[in-house]
Amino acid sequence: MIFYYEAIKEVSNEKISGTIEGESPRDVRDKIKKQGFLPIKVKEISQNSSTESDNNTNSIVAKLSLSEKIQFTSELESLLTSQIPILEALETIKQSAPNRKIKYIANSIQKAIGNGYSLAQAFEKFKNIFDNVYIGLVAAGEKSGNIDKTFGRIVRILKKQQDVKWKVINALTYPGILCIIMFIVILAFTFIVIPKFMEMYSSIGGELPPFTKAFLGFFSLKTLLICFILLTTFIFLLKTPKFKALFDYHILKVPMLSDFIRAANLSNFIAVLEVSYEAGIPISKCLEMAGSTVKNVVIKKQAANSVIMVNKGHTLTDSFKSSHLLDPVSENLIAAGEKSGELGHMLYQISENFDRLINNTIDILSKAVEPVMLIIMGIVVVIILLAFLPVITGAGLSI
Protein backbone atom coordinates (compact mmCIF):
# COMPACT_ATOMS: atom_id res chain seq x y z
CA MET A 1 0.00 0.00 0.00
CA ILE A 2 1.07 3.59 -0.71
CA PHE A 3 0.69 6.25 1.99
CA TYR A 4 0.99 10.02 1.89
CA TYR A 5 2.84 11.38 4.93
CA GLU A 6 3.82 14.63 6.58
CA ALA A 7 6.62 14.70 9.14
CA ILE A 8 8.83 17.15 11.00
CA LYS A 9 12.43 17.18 12.21
CA GLU A 10 12.17 17.22 16.01
CA VAL A 11 15.18 19.53 16.47
CA SER A 12 14.46 22.16 13.79
CA ASN A 13 10.68 21.59 13.36
CA GLU A 14 11.28 21.61 9.59
CA LYS A 15 8.37 19.99 7.74
CA ILE A 16 8.65 17.43 4.93
CA SER A 17 6.06 15.46 2.97
CA GLY A 18 5.91 12.71 0.37
CA THR A 19 4.74 9.16 -0.29
CA ILE A 20 5.98 5.91 1.20
CA GLU A 21 5.13 2.23 0.83
CA GLY A 22 4.05 0.21 3.86
CA GLU A 23 1.80 -2.55 5.12
CA SER A 24 -0.14 -0.33 7.51
CA PRO A 25 -0.14 3.24 8.93
CA ARG A 26 1.80 1.97 11.98
CA ASP A 27 4.42 0.37 9.71
CA VAL A 28 4.78 3.67 7.86
CA ARG A 29 5.17 5.65 11.10
CA ASP A 30 7.92 3.28 12.22
CA LYS A 31 9.78 3.73 8.92
CA ILE A 32 9.57 7.52 9.17
CA LYS A 33 10.82 7.50 12.79
CA LYS A 34 13.82 5.35 11.79
CA GLN A 35 14.78 8.06 9.30
CA GLY A 36 14.93 10.65 12.08
CA PHE A 37 11.54 12.31 11.57
CA LEU A 38 8.35 12.61 13.63
CA PRO A 39 5.24 11.65 11.59
CA ILE A 40 2.30 14.03 12.03
CA LYS A 41 0.05 12.74 9.23
CA VAL A 42 -0.22 9.38 7.47
CA LYS A 43 -2.93 8.72 4.88
CA GLU A 44 -3.39 5.85 2.43
CA ILE A 45 -3.57 6.80 -1.26
CA SER A 46 -4.32 4.73 -4.36
CA GLN A 47 -1.53 2.98 -6.27
CA ASN A 48 -2.79 4.48 -9.55
CA SER A 49 -2.33 8.08 -8.44
CA SER A 50 1.26 7.38 -7.38
CA THR A 51 2.06 5.73 -10.71
CA GLU A 52 0.48 8.58 -12.62
CA SER A 53 2.53 11.09 -10.64
CA ASP A 54 5.77 9.24 -11.40
CA ASN A 55 4.92 9.10 -15.12
CA ASN A 56 4.20 12.82 -15.18
CA THR A 57 7.50 13.49 -13.43
CA ASN A 58 9.53 11.50 -15.96
CA SER A 59 7.71 13.10 -18.91
CA ILE A 60 8.30 16.63 -17.61
CA VAL A 61 11.99 16.09 -16.84
CA ALA A 62 13.26 14.68 -20.12
CA LYS A 63 16.73 16.19 -19.86
CA LEU A 64 19.03 18.24 -17.65
CA SER A 65 21.79 20.43 -18.98
CA LEU A 66 25.31 19.86 -17.69
CA SER A 67 25.07 23.05 -15.62
CA GLU A 68 21.77 21.94 -14.05
CA LYS A 69 23.23 18.52 -13.26
CA ILE A 70 26.22 20.17 -11.56
CA GLN A 71 23.90 22.47 -9.58
CA PHE A 72 21.74 19.59 -8.32
CA THR A 73 24.70 17.36 -7.44
CA SER A 74 26.65 20.19 -5.76
CA GLU A 75 23.69 21.12 -3.56
CA LEU A 76 23.16 17.49 -2.60
CA GLU A 77 26.85 17.11 -1.74
CA SER A 78 26.88 20.27 0.40
CA LEU A 79 23.80 19.23 2.37
CA LEU A 80 25.02 15.66 2.96
CA THR A 81 28.47 16.93 3.98
CA SER A 82 26.67 19.02 6.64
CA GLN A 83 25.32 15.74 8.10
CA ILE A 84 21.76 16.42 6.89
CA PRO A 85 19.77 13.19 6.25
CA ILE A 86 19.12 12.38 2.61
CA LEU A 87 15.33 12.87 2.81
CA GLU A 88 15.75 16.23 4.47
CA ALA A 89 18.42 17.22 1.94
CA LEU A 90 16.12 16.37 -0.95
CA GLU A 91 13.29 18.29 0.70
CA THR A 92 15.54 21.34 1.05
CA ILE A 93 16.48 21.15 -2.63
CA LYS A 94 12.84 20.68 -3.60
CA GLN A 95 11.78 23.76 -1.64
CA SER A 96 14.67 26.06 -2.60
CA ALA A 97 15.55 25.12 -6.19
CA PRO A 98 14.53 27.85 -8.67
CA ASN A 99 14.55 25.27 -11.48
CA ARG A 100 11.27 23.36 -11.91
CA LYS A 101 13.00 20.31 -13.35
CA ILE A 102 15.33 19.99 -10.34
CA LYS A 103 12.31 20.28 -8.01
CA TYR A 104 10.66 17.37 -9.81
CA ILE A 105 13.79 15.21 -9.66
CA ALA A 106 14.31 15.88 -5.95
CA ASN A 107 10.65 15.10 -5.27
CA SER A 108 10.70 11.87 -7.28
CA ILE A 109 13.91 10.59 -5.65
CA GLN A 110 12.54 11.51 -2.23
CA LYS A 111 9.36 9.52 -2.92
CA ALA A 112 11.30 6.52 -4.18
CA ILE A 113 13.49 6.43 -1.05
CA GLY A 114 10.37 6.74 1.08
CA ASN A 115 8.96 3.72 -0.75
CA GLY A 116 11.97 1.63 0.24
CA TYR A 117 14.26 2.12 -2.77
CA SER A 118 17.96 2.73 -2.31
CA LEU A 119 19.39 6.06 -3.46
CA ALA A 120 20.97 4.45 -6.54
CA GLN A 121 17.67 2.75 -7.42
CA ALA A 122 15.90 6.10 -7.05
CA PHE A 123 18.36 7.72 -9.48
CA GLU A 124 17.73 4.87 -11.94
CA LYS A 125 14.24 6.30 -12.43
CA PHE A 126 16.01 9.03 -14.43
CA LYS A 127 18.38 6.95 -16.57
CA ASN A 128 17.82 9.37 -19.41
CA ILE A 129 19.46 12.08 -17.25
CA PHE A 130 21.93 10.27 -14.98
CA ASP A 131 24.18 7.87 -16.90
CA ASN A 132 25.59 4.53 -15.75
CA VAL A 133 28.73 6.19 -14.35
CA TYR A 134 26.68 8.52 -12.16
CA ILE A 135 24.38 5.76 -10.89
CA GLY A 136 27.28 3.32 -10.42
CA LEU A 137 29.19 5.81 -8.30
CA VAL A 138 26.09 6.55 -6.21
CA ALA A 139 25.65 2.81 -5.58
CA ALA A 140 29.32 2.49 -4.56
CA GLY A 141 29.01 5.52 -2.27
CA GLU A 142 25.96 4.03 -0.56
CA LYS A 143 27.72 0.72 -0.05
CA SER A 144 30.85 2.34 1.44
CA GLY A 145 28.94 4.86 3.55
CA ASN A 146 30.74 7.81 1.91
CA ILE A 147 27.91 9.11 -0.21
CA ASP A 148 28.76 12.77 0.48
CA LYS A 149 32.34 12.28 -0.78
CA THR A 150 31.02 10.35 -3.77
CA PHE A 151 28.79 13.25 -4.81
CA GLY A 152 31.85 15.50 -4.48
CA ARG A 153 33.74 13.22 -6.87
CA ILE A 154 30.82 13.23 -9.30
CA VAL A 155 30.78 17.03 -9.23
CA ARG A 156 34.50 17.03 -10.12
CA ILE A 157 33.85 14.80 -13.15
CA LEU A 158 30.92 16.93 -14.32
CA LYS A 159 32.90 20.15 -13.90
CA LYS A 160 35.78 18.66 -15.89
CA GLN A 161 33.38 17.84 -18.72
CA GLN A 162 31.93 21.36 -18.57
CA ASP A 163 35.41 22.90 -18.56
CA VAL A 164 36.43 21.04 -21.73
CA LYS A 165 33.11 21.92 -23.37
CA TRP A 166 33.53 25.66 -22.71
CA LYS A 167 37.15 25.64 -23.84
CA VAL A 168 36.11 24.11 -27.17
CA ILE A 169 33.26 26.61 -27.53
CA ASN A 170 35.58 29.54 -26.81
CA ALA A 171 38.15 28.24 -29.28
CA LEU A 172 35.52 27.85 -32.02
CA THR A 173 33.72 31.16 -31.42
CA TYR A 174 35.90 33.35 -33.64
CA PRO A 175 36.20 30.84 -36.53
CA GLY A 176 32.45 30.24 -36.20
CA ILE A 177 31.68 33.94 -36.57
CA LEU A 178 33.87 34.10 -39.69
CA CYS A 179 32.08 31.06 -41.15
CA ILE A 180 28.69 32.68 -40.51
CA ILE A 181 29.84 35.88 -42.23
CA MET A 182 31.06 33.87 -45.24
CA PHE A 183 27.78 31.96 -45.36
CA ILE A 184 25.75 35.21 -45.27
CA VAL A 185 27.89 36.67 -48.08
CA ILE A 186 27.37 33.54 -50.20
CA LEU A 187 23.60 33.63 -49.60
CA ALA A 188 23.50 37.34 -50.48
CA PHE A 189 25.35 36.71 -53.74
CA THR A 190 23.22 33.67 -54.60
CA PHE A 191 19.78 35.16 -53.96
CA ILE A 192 20.25 38.95 -54.34
CA VAL A 193 23.37 40.08 -56.24
CA ILE A 194 23.66 37.38 -58.90
CA PRO A 195 19.97 37.35 -60.00
CA LYS A 196 19.99 41.15 -60.42
CA PHE A 197 23.33 41.00 -62.22
CA MET A 198 22.09 38.35 -64.62
CA GLU A 199 18.88 40.31 -65.24
CA MET A 200 20.86 43.48 -66.02
CA TYR A 201 23.16 41.78 -68.53
CA SER A 202 20.27 39.94 -70.16
CA SER A 203 18.52 43.26 -70.77
CA ILE A 204 21.52 44.90 -72.47
CA GLY A 205 22.61 41.80 -74.37
CA GLY A 206 26.12 41.76 -72.90
CA GLU A 207 28.35 38.70 -72.94
CA LEU A 208 30.09 37.84 -69.70
CA PRO A 209 33.77 36.84 -69.47
CA PRO A 210 34.39 33.05 -69.02
CA PHE A 211 35.59 33.38 -65.42
CA THR A 212 32.52 35.42 -64.48
CA LYS A 213 30.25 32.81 -66.10
CA ALA A 214 31.97 30.06 -64.14
CA PHE A 215 31.62 32.05 -60.91
CA LEU A 216 27.91 32.69 -61.49
CA GLY A 217 27.43 29.03 -62.33
CA PHE A 218 29.08 27.91 -59.11
CA PHE A 219 27.24 30.29 -56.77
CA SER A 220 23.76 29.08 -57.60
CA LEU A 221 20.81 27.52 -55.81
CA LYS A 222 21.75 24.18 -57.34
CA THR A 223 25.23 24.32 -55.77
CA LEU A 224 23.79 25.18 -52.35
CA LEU A 225 21.32 22.30 -52.66
CA ILE A 226 24.15 19.88 -53.52
CA CYS A 227 26.18 21.12 -50.52
CA PHE A 228 23.15 20.66 -48.26
CA ILE A 229 22.56 17.11 -49.52
CA LEU A 230 26.24 16.22 -49.02
CA LEU A 231 26.24 17.62 -45.48
CA THR A 232 22.99 15.83 -44.58
CA THR A 233 24.34 12.57 -46.01
CA PHE A 234 27.56 12.92 -44.01
CA ILE A 235 25.64 13.51 -40.76
CA PHE A 236 23.42 10.50 -41.47
CA LEU A 237 26.41 8.25 -42.26
CA LEU A 238 28.16 9.42 -39.09
CA LYS A 239 25.36 7.78 -37.12
CA THR A 240 26.03 4.39 -38.69
CA PRO A 241 28.55 2.17 -36.80
CA LYS A 242 30.75 1.31 -39.81
CA PHE A 243 31.13 4.85 -41.11
CA LYS A 244 31.60 6.21 -37.57
CA ALA A 245 34.40 3.70 -36.95
CA LEU A 246 36.04 4.63 -40.26
CA PHE A 247 35.74 8.35 -39.55
CA ASP A 248 37.09 8.00 -35.99
CA TYR A 249 40.05 5.99 -37.29
CA HIS A 250 41.05 8.53 -39.94
CA ILE A 251 40.49 11.61 -37.78
CA LEU A 252 43.09 10.25 -35.36
CA LYS A 253 45.59 10.56 -38.23
CA VAL A 254 45.13 14.34 -38.49
CA PRO A 255 48.01 16.22 -36.79
CA MET A 256 47.09 18.32 -33.71
CA LEU A 257 43.41 17.44 -34.03
CA SER A 258 44.21 13.83 -33.13
CA ASP A 259 46.07 15.04 -30.01
CA PHE A 260 43.02 16.96 -28.87
CA ILE A 261 40.55 14.12 -29.55
CA ARG A 262 42.70 11.57 -27.75
CA ALA A 263 43.33 13.91 -24.80
CA ALA A 264 39.64 14.85 -24.47
CA ASN A 265 38.54 11.20 -24.48
CA LEU A 266 41.29 9.96 -22.16
CA SER A 267 40.99 12.87 -19.71
CA ASN A 268 37.39 11.90 -18.98
CA PHE A 269 38.29 8.19 -19.05
CA ILE A 270 41.07 8.56 -16.46
CA ALA A 271 38.97 10.92 -14.30
CA VAL A 272 36.13 8.38 -14.07
CA LEU A 273 38.64 5.57 -13.51
CA GLU A 274 40.25 7.48 -10.63
CA VAL A 275 36.97 8.49 -8.99
CA SER A 276 35.40 5.04 -9.24
CA TYR A 277 38.61 3.41 -7.95
CA GLU A 278 38.69 5.77 -4.95
CA ALA A 279 35.03 4.91 -4.33
CA GLY A 280 36.04 1.27 -3.81
CA ILE A 281 34.67 -0.21 -7.03
CA PRO A 282 36.56 -3.26 -8.42
CA ILE A 283 39.11 -2.25 -11.05
CA SER A 284 37.47 -4.22 -13.90
CA LYS A 285 34.15 -2.47 -13.19
CA CYS A 286 36.01 0.87 -12.97
CA LEU A 287 37.41 0.28 -16.45
CA GLU A 288 33.97 -0.60 -17.82
CA MET A 289 32.47 2.58 -16.36
CA ALA A 290 35.35 4.70 -17.63
CA GLY A 291 35.15 3.09 -21.08
CA SER A 292 31.46 4.00 -21.36
CA THR A 293 32.43 7.70 -21.38
CA VAL A 294 34.72 7.38 -24.42
CA LYS A 295 33.16 8.64 -27.68
CA ASN A 296 35.85 7.77 -30.24
CA VAL A 297 35.31 4.21 -31.51
CA VAL A 298 39.04 3.42 -31.85
CA ILE A 299 39.87 4.59 -28.32
CA LYS A 300 36.76 2.84 -26.98
CA LYS A 301 37.96 -0.45 -28.49
CA GLN A 302 41.38 0.00 -26.87
CA ALA A 303 39.67 0.63 -23.52
CA ALA A 304 37.54 -2.51 -23.97
CA ASN A 305 40.70 -4.56 -24.65
CA SER A 306 42.17 -3.35 -21.36
CA VAL A 307 39.06 -4.63 -19.54
CA ILE A 308 39.53 -8.05 -21.14
CA MET A 309 43.19 -8.14 -20.06
CA VAL A 310 42.36 -7.20 -16.45
CA ASN A 311 39.64 -9.87 -16.30
CA LYS A 312 42.27 -12.39 -17.42
CA GLY A 313 44.38 -11.50 -14.39
CA HIS A 314 46.84 -9.00 -15.88
CA THR A 315 47.87 -5.84 -14.05
CA LEU A 316 46.44 -2.48 -15.06
CA THR A 317 49.85 -1.45 -16.39
CA ASP A 318 50.20 -4.53 -18.61
CA SER A 319 46.61 -4.12 -19.80
CA PHE A 320 47.20 -0.53 -20.92
CA LYS A 321 50.51 -1.45 -22.58
CA SER A 322 48.86 -4.30 -24.47
CA SER A 323 45.92 -2.15 -25.64
CA HIS A 324 48.17 0.86 -26.52
CA LEU A 325 45.62 3.09 -24.82
CA LEU A 326 47.97 5.47 -23.00
CA ASP A 327 51.30 7.13 -23.67
CA PRO A 328 54.52 5.72 -22.07
CA VAL A 329 54.65 8.46 -19.39
CA SER A 330 51.12 7.63 -18.20
CA GLU A 331 51.91 3.89 -18.26
CA ASN A 332 54.97 4.48 -16.05
CA LEU A 333 52.91 6.53 -13.58
CA ILE A 334 50.32 3.76 -13.33
CA ALA A 335 53.06 1.16 -12.83
CA ALA A 336 54.51 3.27 -10.01
CA GLY A 337 51.05 3.67 -8.48
CA GLU A 338 50.36 -0.07 -8.52
CA LYS A 339 53.72 -0.82 -6.87
CA SER A 340 53.41 1.87 -4.19
CA GLY A 341 49.71 1.45 -3.49
CA GLU A 342 49.05 5.04 -4.62
CA LEU A 343 47.18 4.20 -7.82
CA GLY A 344 44.40 6.70 -7.11
CA HIS A 345 46.87 9.55 -6.71
CA MET A 346 48.74 8.58 -9.88
CA LEU A 347 45.49 8.43 -11.86
CA TYR A 348 44.69 11.93 -10.62
CA GLN A 349 48.10 13.14 -11.82
CA ILE A 350 47.53 11.57 -15.24
CA SER A 351 44.13 13.25 -15.47
CA GLU A 352 45.75 16.61 -14.70
CA ASN A 353 48.39 15.94 -17.38
CA PHE A 354 45.68 15.32 -19.95
CA ASP A 355 43.92 18.54 -18.90
CA ARG A 356 47.11 20.51 -19.54
CA LEU A 357 47.50 18.77 -22.89
CA ILE A 358 43.92 19.75 -23.80
CA ASN A 359 44.60 23.39 -22.90
CA ASN A 360 47.82 23.49 -24.92
CA THR A 361 46.23 21.76 -27.93
CA ILE A 362 43.21 24.09 -27.92
CA ASP A 363 45.54 27.11 -27.81
CA ILE A 364 47.57 25.77 -30.74
CA LEU A 365 44.48 24.86 -32.79
CA SER A 366 42.76 28.21 -32.19
CA LYS A 367 45.92 30.10 -33.17
CA ALA A 368 46.21 27.96 -36.31
CA VAL A 369 42.53 28.14 -37.32
CA GLU A 370 42.19 31.94 -37.13
CA PRO A 371 44.78 32.78 -39.82
CA VAL A 372 43.51 29.91 -42.00
CA MET A 373 39.99 31.34 -41.84
CA LEU A 374 41.28 34.82 -42.68
CA ILE A 375 43.17 33.40 -45.66
CA ILE A 376 40.03 31.61 -46.89
CA MET A 377 37.98 34.80 -46.56
CA GLY A 378 40.71 36.69 -48.43
CA ILE A 379 40.64 34.11 -51.25
CA VAL A 380 36.84 34.44 -51.48
CA VAL A 381 37.12 38.24 -51.74
CA VAL A 382 39.82 37.98 -54.44
CA ILE A 383 37.69 35.52 -56.46
CA ILE A 384 34.70 37.88 -56.26
CA LEU A 385 36.85 40.78 -57.43
CA LEU A 386 38.31 38.76 -60.32
CA ALA A 387 34.81 37.72 -61.37
CA PHE A 388 33.13 41.11 -61.25
CA LEU A 389 35.82 43.77 -61.59
CA PRO A 390 36.44 43.22 -65.34
CA VAL A 391 32.72 43.47 -65.97
CA ILE A 392 32.25 46.56 -63.80
CA THR A 393 35.18 48.37 -65.43
CA GLY A 394 34.00 47.33 -68.89
CA ALA A 395 36.97 45.05 -69.59
CA GLY A 396 36.05 42.01 -71.60
CA LEU A 397 32.49 43.27 -72.16
CA SER A 398 31.24 42.98 -75.73
CA ILE A 399 27.84 44.27 -76.78
Image (cartoon, rainbow, N blue to C red):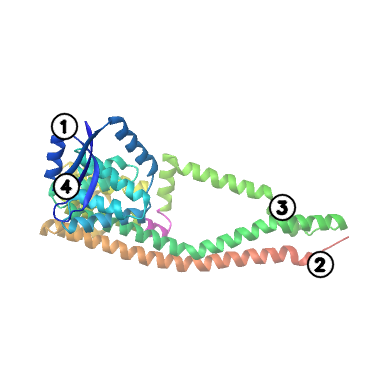
Query: CA separation, marks 1 and 2?
Result: 97 Å
Q: Which numbered disc flags the more N-terminal residue, 4 or 2?
A: 4
Mark 1 vs mark 2: in front: 1
Does 213 sit left or right of 49 as displayed?
A: right
Name the kind of residue labelled 4 in the image.
Answer: Glu
Please report the residue visible at 80 percent of the width from the left and 69 percent of the height from the top.
Answer: 393
Q: Which numbered disc flags the more N-terminal residue, 1 or 3?
A: 1
* Residue position marked by numbered label 4 in the rendering: 142
Does the magenta run of residues contain 257?
A: yes
Query: CA separation, marks 4 and 2?
Result: 81 Å
**Label pair 4/2, CB-CB below 8 angstroms:** no
Q: Which numbered disc flags the more N-terminal residue, 2 or 3?
A: 3
Please report the residue visible at 55 percent of the width from the left and 64 percent of the height from the top.
Answer: 178
**Label pair 3/4, CB-CB below 8 angstroms:** no
State the mark number for residue 395: 2
Query: CA separation, marks 2 and 3?
Result: 20 Å
* Residue position marked by numbered label 3 in the rendering: 217
Query: CA separation, marks 1 and 3?
Result: 81 Å
| Quadrant of the rendering where the C terminus is positioned | bottom right
Q: Which numbered disc flags the more N-terminal residue, 1 or 2?
A: 1
